[in-house]
Image (cartoon, rainbow, N blue to C red):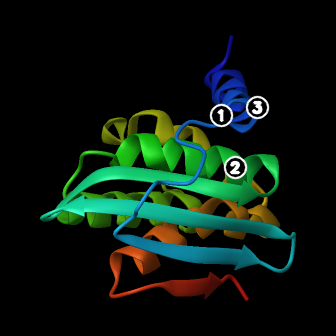
């Protein structure tokens, strides 16, 4: 089995069985994200303990890439500090938007998103959750749109 097939299977699994899906009770912060082009809509909930993301969840509806990206993101950032989350955001954004960017081993399962770059119209689907997480980590509630 090729790496591309493994990545595709991982994306499909996270779409069918999203991790950390559902509302987070009494979140400290939340943000709504919307991709008008394809209709993806999600809310990211974050509970902080100091600088650490003690818990993170999401809910909403969207395409397979949007849902899988949000599921993979929540697994990757839960328990991490804000600086680490910011660095992960930068790595994933570069992977999805920069020609020739290769997945770094430190990305773990997030490397599965690398194939999305081949479909420019889907990049916004994969990055929506990340932009929404950034908004949730800002001050107060926020709404994010990819348009």
128 and 119: which is toward the camera: 128
Q: Dot 2, how many residues are within 10 Å of its Cα: few (below 14), some (14-19), or many (20+)?
A: many
Which residue is denoted by mark 3 in the rendering?
16
Mark 2 lies on residue: 67
Contact flag, marks 2 and 3 (Cβ < 8 Å): no
What is the x, y in percent for residue 105? 35, 35
Q: What residue do we see at 12% from left, 64% from top? A: 50
* Res. 129 image quadrant: bottom right
Residue for point 67% across, 65% down: 42
Quote the CA–CA distance across marks 2 and 1: 7 Å
Inter-mark Cα distance, 1 to 3: 6 Å
Percent position of residue 136, x then y: 42, 75
Q: Residue at 40% x, 34% y: name it.
A: 108
Q: In the image, 56: left or right of 86?
A: right
Badge 1 marks a residue whose secondary structure is helix
Position of 4 relative to 113 (above/below): above
Residue 14 is labelled as 1
- The reply to whether discs 2 and 1 touch (Cβ–Cβ < 8 Å) is yes
1 and 3 marks in contact (CB < 8 Å) = yes
Mark sitting earlier along the chain (2/1): 1
* Quarter-of-image position of residue 91: bottom left
Which residue is outermost to the right?
38
């Amino acid at each position: 089995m090729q790496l591309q097939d493994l990545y595709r299977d991982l994306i499909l699994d996270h779409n069918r069985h999203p991790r950390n899906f559902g509302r987070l009770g009494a979140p400290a912060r939340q943000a709504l994200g919307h991709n008008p082009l394809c209709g993806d809509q999600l809310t990211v909930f974050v509970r902080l303990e100091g600088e650490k993301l003690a818990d993170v969840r999401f809910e909403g509806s969207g395409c397979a890439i949007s849902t899988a990206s949000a599921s993979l993101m929540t697994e990757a950032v839960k328990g991490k500090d804000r600086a680490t989350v910011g660095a992960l955001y930068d790595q994933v954004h570069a992977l999805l938007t920069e020609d020739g960017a290769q997945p770094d081993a430190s990305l773990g399962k997030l490397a599965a998103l690398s194939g999305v770059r081949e479909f420019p119209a889907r990049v916004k689907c994969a990055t929506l959750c990340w932009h929404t997480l950034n908004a949730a980590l800002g001050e107060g509630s926020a709404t994010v749109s990819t348009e």
